[in-house]
């Protein structure tokens, strides 16, 4: 399974962010989440952008990691923090900008689909997040 | 946490202080802190635009926590509109970023001699040059700052040209489309040469009992998701109210000379949804994101994008100025946002100017009702203080006082602040709510018109006064806890959730009644700020403008209805009695002492305010 994002429905309220951080770390800190919802203001338009791992075909992050800290375990991108050198190559390689770092954390934050029960999907008030079977 | 950064612009010095227990326990946050800090630190007689005025930017215990509607921040200052206590709150994400940067509140004091912005970033506060931002629109400035700092997640408060030019009703913009609109605090920032305040933080927001917070929040979110109202609010937000107000003879039309707008269908929520809506934008943590994003798709204003319109804007700049289409409303809304003008006061000032011109009371106004180009020009003239705009920039009250006579009757303001978008001749409880609102005529302290509609549009019964007092405490409690009241107002989310959430977040066990007592304390304190400023203030200050007493509604089911003076006096007497105030609206010493506000007594008595014992 993977997450599907309907960006046109997103309202950038950030409920997904805080839900994620509280589920993973029990901290009230949207900056410790593996998903971000942003509003982009353009000259004559406004777009919502949701940044999260989509479990893309390429798995560019896994390939970009020089120290083998990331692997696809068949369900999600698993991070081995002990191997991570915090070089952020994975984040640069991700075309969905779905990998995050935080100064308190040892390695990158990547969506782990909450062990098969993604909480952000349940809590999104706009129905902008969906689970699809990959 | 409980940290406040005191930013002295004159000395270019920032001091970080702990908030004391008295503020935390007795005033909680948001407007509670604003009122207490202004009482303590901004003495009587300080001119709103002098360096001695201060702006308090405060979050509350609930800001940024896991719950619906926690993206709020309250700004308080001595208002240029009224010369007394003013506040305005803003949604979005600023308060969350401020807290994550390590601060619960900022106090902006002194004045800079050149344009600056204040940067708050993970425990650091600095004052930075902003010459390159001065003159930009408020949204332009926000985008420029985020680019410059290369920080997309930063949140800004910015002012536009109106704030820079000291337009008395200048607003503050945040996150593209959210505004602290009322009471002119944008102009106070302008007088201090503060173009923007930008916050960005990555720290945890401390929570006493995370598991309990999650439990309460999940229950509340589930409650909202199940509600039919949630879908309606996402679809049209406050714009649902245009047709509702129109059907109830409450839609301000042509400077509130009428209460039914013949073109309401053209500026309604349905018109928005059908013609211009392109998406939603929610404040942080919201379960019912009601902010609308609109874009004009065709015609001469094609390509204009705005967050909104909200009901208040569509009514005050729309029907009240007789605009012809939702596209015209979107255009004016974006213009006001970019210039940094409060759409409520702007709509009222423009409509007042047009009516004065039509009645031969004011020269130099070229705009007319329904004349979108003329209105655009007039709004720009106000923001840049050109021609007649320079006078109008001071708000309806000052202009009316200058013109005298008939102009005073049709200046739709109370205590200097323009009345927001509920025409209340056939709504006595709402009229009382406006009359006794502690920042001037604003609806957010008590939206009592629904009660008028429920119990009777021309009744002046004591229960109406009781309802207004109740609302003034509940609704200001939201601005004290600093979160959005709409889940409670619109989806009937029970207030007990807030009691539980407050306990989970702070570890302090307080019952709802105790929290409401804080709201009452703050309401009395703000009244005392008014009395300290204006010791001669009496009950006449709590009256709506003469138009509502003297002119009957011109059409509709309530044709001929006007406010009954005797009835209003009775309501006011009842209201004062319920509050423990004397017949001129002065709190008794007994009331003040019982609320822990004994410290104001000596100050007020020294000024000659005659306070009765009980």
Image (cartoon, coloured by chain):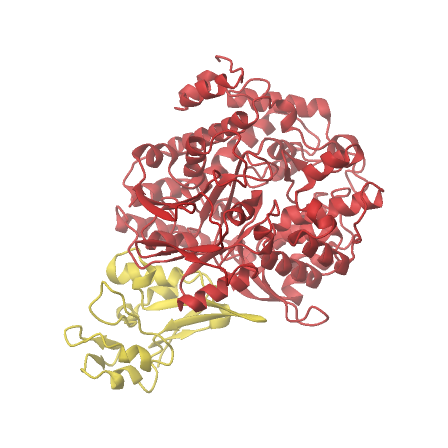
B6, above or below B375, in the image: above
B111, above or below A33, in the image: above
- Tell which of B361 and B66 is nearer to you: B361
Give the residue drawn at x 69%, y 34%.
Answer: B457
Give the residue drawn at x 49%, y 40%.
Answer: B77
A122, above or below A7, in the image: above
In the image: residue B121, left or right of residue A9: left
Can residue B320 be seen here? The reply is no
Can residue A108 be seen here? The reply is yes
- Numbered label tally: 0
In the image: residue A66, left or right of residue A126: left
Give the residue drawn at x 61%, y 22%.
Answer: B538
Q: Position of residue B291 (x, y in %)?
A: 54, 58
Identify the image quadrant of residue B304. bottom right
In the image: residue B102, left or right of residue B590: left
In the image: residue B510, left or right of residue B372: left
Q: Position of residue B269 (x, y in %)?
A: 64, 57
Q: Residue furthest top?
A: B613
A24, above or below B388, in the image: below
- Tell which of B22 and B590 is nearer to you: B22
Q: Position of residue B28 (x, y in %)?
A: 37, 37
Tell me the yellow chain.
Answer: A
Color of chain B here? Answer: red
- Tell which of B99 and B18 is nearer to you: B18
């Amino acid at each position: 399974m993977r997450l599907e994002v309907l960006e046109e429905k997103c309202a950038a309220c950030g409920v997904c962010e805080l839900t994620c951080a509280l589920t993973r770390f029990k901290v009230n800190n949207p900056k410790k989440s593996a998903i971000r919802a942003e509003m982009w203001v353009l000259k004559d338009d406004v777009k919502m952008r949701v940044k999260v791992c989509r479990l893309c075909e390429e798995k560019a992050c896994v390939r970009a990691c020089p120290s083998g800290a990331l692997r696809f375990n068949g369900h999600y991108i698993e991070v081995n923090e002990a191997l991570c050198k915090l070089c952020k190559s994975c984040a640069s390689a991700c075309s969905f900008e779905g990998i995050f770092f935080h100064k308190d954390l040892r390695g990158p934050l990547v969506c782990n689909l909450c062990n098969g029960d993604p909480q952000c999907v349940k809590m999104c008030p706009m129905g902008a997040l969906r689970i699809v079977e990959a | 946490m409980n940290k406040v950064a005191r930013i002295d612009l004159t000395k270019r010095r920032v001091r970080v202080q702990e908030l004391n227990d008295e503020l935390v326990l007795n005033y909680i946050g948001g407007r509670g802190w604003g009122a207490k800090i202004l009482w303590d630190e901004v003495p009587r007689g300080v001119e709103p635009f002098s360096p001695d005025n201060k702006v308090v930017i405060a979050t509350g215990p609930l800001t940024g926590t896991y719950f619906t509607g926690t993206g709020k921040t309250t700004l308080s200052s001595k208002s240029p509109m009224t010369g007394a206590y003013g506040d305005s709150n803003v949604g979005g994400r600023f308060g969350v970023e401020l807290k994550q940067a390590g601060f619960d509140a900022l106090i902006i004091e002194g004045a800079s001699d050149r344009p600056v912005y204040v940067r708050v970033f993970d425990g650091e506060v600095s004052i930075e040059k902003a010459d390159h931002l001065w003159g930009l629109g408020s949204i332009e400035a926000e985008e420029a700052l985020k680019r410059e700092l290369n920080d997309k997640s930063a949140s800004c408060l910015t002012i536009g040209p109106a704030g820079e030019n000291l337009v008395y009703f200048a607003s503050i913009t945040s996150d593209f489309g959210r505004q602290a609109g009322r009471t002119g605090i944008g102009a106070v920032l302008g007088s201090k040469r503060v173009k923007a305040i930008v916050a960005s933080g990555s720290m945890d927001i401390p929570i006493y009992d995370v598991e309990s917070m999650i439990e309460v929040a999940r229950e509340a979110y589930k409650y909202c998701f199940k509600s039919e109202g949630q879908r309606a609010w996402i679809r049209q937000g406050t714009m649902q109210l245009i047709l509702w107000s129109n059907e109830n003879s409450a839609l301000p039309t042509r400077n509130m000379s009428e209460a039914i707008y013949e073109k309401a269908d053209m500026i309604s929520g349905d018109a928005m949804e059908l013609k211009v809506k392109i998406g939603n934008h929610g404040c942080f943590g919201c379960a019912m994101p009601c902010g609308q994003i609109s874009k004009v798709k065709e015609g001469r204003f094609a390509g204009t994008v705005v967050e909104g319109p909200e009901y208040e804007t569509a009514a005050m700049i729309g029907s009240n100025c007789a605009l012809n289409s939702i596209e015209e409303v979107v255009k004016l809304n974006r213009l006001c946002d970019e210039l940094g003008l409060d759409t409520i006061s702007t709509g009222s000032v423009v409509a007042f100017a047009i009516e004065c011109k039509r009645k031969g009371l004011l020269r130099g106004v070229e705009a007319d009702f329904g004349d979108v180009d003329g209105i655009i020009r007039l709004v720009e003239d106000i923001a840049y203080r050109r021609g007649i705009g320079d006078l109008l920039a001071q708000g309806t009250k000052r202009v009316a006082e200058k013109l005298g006579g008939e102009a005073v009757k049709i200046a739709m303001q109370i205590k200097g602040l323009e009345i927001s978008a509920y025409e209340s001749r056939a709504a006595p409880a709402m009229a009382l709510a406006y009359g006794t609102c502690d920042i001037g005529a604003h609806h957010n302290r008590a939206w009592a018109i629904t009660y008028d509609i429920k119990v009777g549009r021309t009744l002046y019964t004591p229960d109406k006064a009781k309802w207004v007092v109740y609302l003034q405490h509940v609704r200001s409690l939201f601005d004290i806890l600093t979160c959005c009241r709409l889940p409670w107002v619109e989806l009937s989310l029970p207030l007990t959730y807030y009691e539980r959430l407050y306990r989970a977040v702070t570890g302090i066990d307080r019952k709802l009644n105790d929290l409401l007592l804080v709201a009452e304390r703050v309401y009395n304190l703000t009244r005392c700020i008014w009395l300290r400023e204006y010791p001669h203030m009496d009950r006449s200050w709590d009256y709506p403008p003469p138009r509502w007493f003297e002119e009957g509604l011109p059409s509709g089911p309530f044709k001929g209805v006007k406010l009954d003076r005797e009835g209003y006096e009775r309501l006011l007497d009842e209201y004062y009695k319920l509050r423990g105030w004397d017949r001129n609206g002065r709190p008794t010493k007994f009331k003040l002492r019982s609320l822990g506000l004994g410290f104001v007594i000596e100050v007020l008595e020294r000024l000659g305010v005659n306070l009765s014992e009980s």
